[in-house]
Amino acid sequence: MTQRDYVSRGRAPKPNQKKNKPAARKKHNQKQAPENTVPATLWVRVVVVVLILIGFAAWLWSIKDNAPAPDNQIEQPLVIQDEEGLPELPEEDWQYIKSLPGYEVEVDVEAHQGSGRRYLMQCASFRTRAQAEEMKAKIAFQGQESQIRKSTGENGDWFRVILGPFDTKRDAERARHSLRRASITTCQIWFWNL
């Protein structure tokens, strides 16, 4: 017998198997409970919960008017009213109003001298002078005056765009914030050491 004959032959019927399968299935289906019915225990639980809620509502209804009256009530102060119906204003006596003009404070203030440090702000550094000139023009449109300084280092020539000198760091910060509004965000503040 070849393999093909074995496959095409199909299965042999089992000796104990009944040929009447649909009848066996019907008997099995009749033993199951119908799916649409609700068990009686669920109805009992629902009824018990409803009775408890009704009892709780009746108990609250019965005690709503049984609150005891307060024994010690706070007495309201007697307010004297004038003929217009408004209370009289009390007399105010403020001591500091009389004594404040007589005080004088003397403070020894030394003349503020700057820290001696001056600040510069570098906004860019370029390889070509044309790029540096373009950045200088953007800064000039914002009302700031910048300079281009050429510096030579190990990496070759660089053209730095700087602003300053500023006497205080606050002045440098103010200039940097005005440039930020124009989307020039690369500025850094350093001590003046050129």
Image (tube, helix red, strand yellow):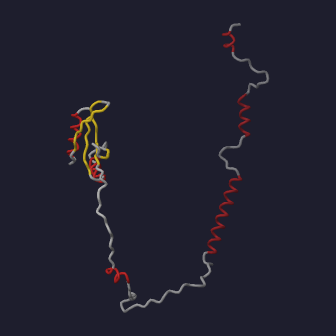
x%, y% of residue 39? 70, 50
Residue at image coords 71%, 34% = 26
Residue at image coords 38%, 83% = 95
As drawn, the residue found furthest toward the top would be: 1
- The reply, left or right, for residue 23 in relation to residue 73 is right
x%, y% of residue 10? 69, 16
Quarter containing the N terminus: top right
**How many numbered discs sit on the rendered protein?**
0
In the rendered image, the vertical position of residue 87 relative to residue 43, given as above or below? below
- The reply, left or right, for residue 147 in relation to residue 14 is left
In the rendered image, the vertical position of residue 166 relative to residue 151, given as above or below? below
Residue 74 in sight: yes
Q: Quadrant of residue 52?
A: bottom right
Q: Quadrant of residue 148?
A: top left
Quarter containing the C terminus: top left
- The reply, left or right, for residue 121 in relation to residue 36 is left
Q: Quadrant of residue 124?
A: top left
x%, y% of residue 18? 76, 25
Residue at image coords 25%, 43% = 162
The foreground one among 8 and 72 is 72
x%, y% of residue 171? 28, 53
In the rendered image, the vertical position of residue 85 relative to residue 172, given as above or below? below
As drawn, the residue found furthest toward the right would be: 16
Residue 86 in sight: no
As drawn, the residue found furthest toward the bottom would be: 83
